[in-house]
Image: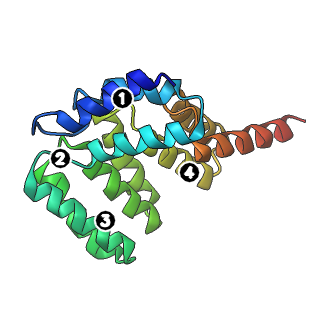
Amino acid sequence: MNTIRLTLVLMALLVSPGAPADQADQRLGPLFEELRAADEAEQARFVEQLIWRIWLESGQPEVNALMAQGMAAMARRQMDAARAVFDQVVILAPEYAEGWNKRATVYYLADDLAASMRDIERTLALEPRHFGALSGMGLIFAEIEDVEGALRAFEAALEIHPMSPTAQASAEELREKLRDQTL
């Protein structure tokens, strides 16, 4: 990875004015380029963390506070409470992709795959580069035994984040499963 370019991206991230940070943030473009170009797992993880940091900032203090509250409820495994908080987030900020993504995660953990998929689709409509949502989609397809759909989702995630260990391992496992099915 070009360290000069990454340093410039980091400087822009740190000195950027208090503009709203979300999936439309102009700092994301260069970060996604760096993520795609990363040739070491550690570099990719670092850039991925910067992307998540931007995605988690809605630009609305009330929504940010709700996001923190919902993620804390998820960490405590209080899924009903987390879903209720993320319901508020998507009502207050319907164009904020990460609110939909977090609620999709809660639905997935509660085994409501249909609701999770609906929220993933909304997340991807707002942020087509959301490698986390694509991986979530892959997990849902794998769970319902749609091997080809799961593989397509994980490969789409890898187009955006080629060093994603989860997407790499899942895609390889699914490719093997498809090879075994054709033998």
Tags 4 and 1 touching, CB below 8 Å: no
Q: Amino acid at mark 2?
A: Ser
Q: Which mark is residue 110?
A: none
Looking at the rendering, which quadrant does residue 10 occupy? top left
SS at circle 3: helix
Q: What residue would you read off at disc 3?
A: 71
Spatial CA distance of label 1 from label 3 is 30 Å
Task: Look at 39% across and 32% down and name the residue there.
Answer: 129
Q: Amino acid at mark 1?
A: Thr
Q: Earlier in the sequence, mark 1 or mark 3?
A: 1
Q: Earlier in the sequence, mark 4 or mark 3?
A: 3
Q: What residue would you read off at disc 1?
A: 7
SS at circle 4: helix
Spatial CA distance of label 3 from label 2 is 14 Å
Spatial CA distance of label 4 from label 1 is 34 Å
Q: Is residue 16 left or right of residue 166?
A: left
Q: What residue would you read off at disc 2?
A: 58
Spatial CA distance of label 4 from label 2 is 26 Å
Q: Is residue 65 left or right of residue 173?
A: left
Place of residue 161 in the rendered image (x, y in percent of width and height, measured from the top left): 51, 33
Spatial CA distance of label 2 from label 1 is 24 Å
Q: Earlier in the sequence, mark 3 or mark 2?
A: 2
Q: Is residue 73 left or right of residue 157?
A: left
